[in-house]
Image (cartoon, coloured by chain):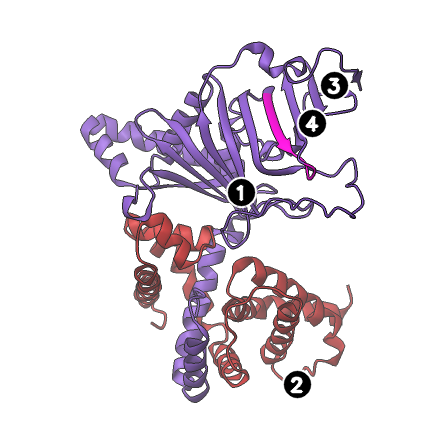
């Protein structure tokens, strides 16, 4: 492996979690995220010769990811209603600013999930292990879809608070 | 946005808000990072940590150890603990269902369900001037009748595009295929004609009740879902989601059962692999549990005695 390829792999490895989260937000499901992410990785490595090392890598990778997601939509992949280009620009900028700060804090995620009450863990399982949408979860749990959507929102906020509290306990930034 | 519940108007409002409010964009980005991490924590992150079998084995060990510890304190506490945890006894229920399924014969009506969740339209009859369908065109699984006793004794009756019956089965010593005309085919390979049976490729224990339960436990995360009579779901269900590191098979399995008798009333295999076509999902509805004579599983019970038989 030559030096340039090693550099490409290293930069991609560091950027991949943020690109993954960005793509996931755009495409709406884990299976499609993986597909788009794979295509992004291939495109990043193939076009790495055009990357300017003087500029930050993440914005460049996010641009390629947006293109890969748009290609998947054109091929007929089932997406949620798309955000405007301006909104995607704003979101990409937010990911660029966040950098890797959030990733270290996510080490606490497993413990925070374990601390959830049983019903919330079940909700978490159905949403994330089963990759089921709120409407389907509502059917399974005998709840209204809006209730499930709000519960999922609360669940994520609760996990974020838990992660913040544990990160603060470690002496990290909350 | 993260759960795919936005309609066009909602997406438009969110787009405008994100474009004009960098703070909101940062908030959404932070939640999106958490959302993605949750997805990986529950799925892809498992890959590389350990194999599905190890997870299943560890889960069993953990449950047994936990149960033993609690039993040492109080049996009543054990009962209460299992009853109040929606996931703790899913494996126990599955074990009971499988044990029950091992006794006697079951006849199911099969329905193909399309992606939108509606019943699939049956293959339309060909137009009068259309060429005859190819001899090997697969008959539809929609409306098929499956009678099963054990992995090696089953009969599946399907109807092809011309309305003719195509029957496949196995009597424990040979597999067979009977069409309304032509030769009857038999094979000593007991799996020879079982490809049409939904779930047969995936070793699902309810289609093949004697197959290993561990296979289901290793490949699927099982959750117990209580009845919801108001939503037309009067029976409890087990919902299984295929683990991220499991290969092949339906993405989800949903089983409605009677907790008093452990009889499975319906089963749905969702998001089946589409590489070879076929329905997206298949639903099994229990029609009856009548006992069948042993001869029912042989090909001779399904055609006239003078039919030519070719052994492959």
Marks 2 and 1 close (CB-CB < 8 Å): no
Relative height, residue A103 to residue B219 (above, below): below
Name the residue tied to disc 3: B186
Residue B74 in view: no
Quarter of the image for residue B103 reads top left
Q: CA distance from mark 4 to mark 1?
A: 35 Å
Label 2 residue SS = loop
**Colour used to depict chain B in the structure image:** purple
Q: Which portion, as a residue range, is magenta? A: B154-162
Name the residue tied to disc 2: A54
Which numbered disc, 1 or 3, marks the residue that appears first in the sequence?
1
Q: CA distance from mark 1 to mark 3?
A: 42 Å
Q: Residues within 10 Å of mark 4 (few under 14, many from 20)?
A: some
- B226 or B67: nearer the viewer: B226
On screen, residue B166 versus residue A19, left or right, reads right
On screen, residue B191 versus residue A105, left or right, reads right
Name the residue tied to disc 1: B50
Q: Nearer the viewer, mark 4 or mark 1?
A: 4
Name the residue tied to disc 4: B193
Label 4 residue SS = loop
**Residue B126 in the image: x percent, y percent?**
71, 46
Q: CA distance from mark 3 to mark 4?
A: 9 Å
Quarter of the image for residue B236 reads top left
């Amino acid at each position: 492996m030559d030096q340039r390829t090693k550099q490409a792999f290293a930069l991609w490895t560091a950027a991949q979690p943020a690109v993954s989260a960005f793509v996931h937000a755009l495409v709406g499901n884990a299976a499609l995220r993986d597909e788009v992410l794979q295509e992004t990785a291939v495109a990043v490595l193939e076009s790495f010769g055009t990357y300017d090392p003087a500029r930050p890598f993440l914005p460049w990778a996010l641009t390629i990811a947006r293109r890969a997601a748009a290609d998947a939509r054109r091929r007929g992949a089932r997406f949620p209603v798309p955000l405007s280009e301006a909104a995607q620009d704003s979101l990409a900028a937010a990911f660029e600013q966040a950098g890797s700060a959030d990733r270290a804090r996510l080490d606490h995620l497993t413990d925070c999930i374990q601390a959830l009450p049983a019903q919330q863990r079940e909700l978490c399982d159905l949403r994330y292990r089963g990759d089921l949408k709120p409407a389907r979860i509502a059917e399974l749990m005998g709840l209204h879809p809006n209730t499930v959507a709000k519960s999922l929102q609360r669940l994520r906020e609760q996990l974020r608070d838990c992660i913040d509290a544990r990160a603060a306990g470690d002496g990290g930034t909350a | 946005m993260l759960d795919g519940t936005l309609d066009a108007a909602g997406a438009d409002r969110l787009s405008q808000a994100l474009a004009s409010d960098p703070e909101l964009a940062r908030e959404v980005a932070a939640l999106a990072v958490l959302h993605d991490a949750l997805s990986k924590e529950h799925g892809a992150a498992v890959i590389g940590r350990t194999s599905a079998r190890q997870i299943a084995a560890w889960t069993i060990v953990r449950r047994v150890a936990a149960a033993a510890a609690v039993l040492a304190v109080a049996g009543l506490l054990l009962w209460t603990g299992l009853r109040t945890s929606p996931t703790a006894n899913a494996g126990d229920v599955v074990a009971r269902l499988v044990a029950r399924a091992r006794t006697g014969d079951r006849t199911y009506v099969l329905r193909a369900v399309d992606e939108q969740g509606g019943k699939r339209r049956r293959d339309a009859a060909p137009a009068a001037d259309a060429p005859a369908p190819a001899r090997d065109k697969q008959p539809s699984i929609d409306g098929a009748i499956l009678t099963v006793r054990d992995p090696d004794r089953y009969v599946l009756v399907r109807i092809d595009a011309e309305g003719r019956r195509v029957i496949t089965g196995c009597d424990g010593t040979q597999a067979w295929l009977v069409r309304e005309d032509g030769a009857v085919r038999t094979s000593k390979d007991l799996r020879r004609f079982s490809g049409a049976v939904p779930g047969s490729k995936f070793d699902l224990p309810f289609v093949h009740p004697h197959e290993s339960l561990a296979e289901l436990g290793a490949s699927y995360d099982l959750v117990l879902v209580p009845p919801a009579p108001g939503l037309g779901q009067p029976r409890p269900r087990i919902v299984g989601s295929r683990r991220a590191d499991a290969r092949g098979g339906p993405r989800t399995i949903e089983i409605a059962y009677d907790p008093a008798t452990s009889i499975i009333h319906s089963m749905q295999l969702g998001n089946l692999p589409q590489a070879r076509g076929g329905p997206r999902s298949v639903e099994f509805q229990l029609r009856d549990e009548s006992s069948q004579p042993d001869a029912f599983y042989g090909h001779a019970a399904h055609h006239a005695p003078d039919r030519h038989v070719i052994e492959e």
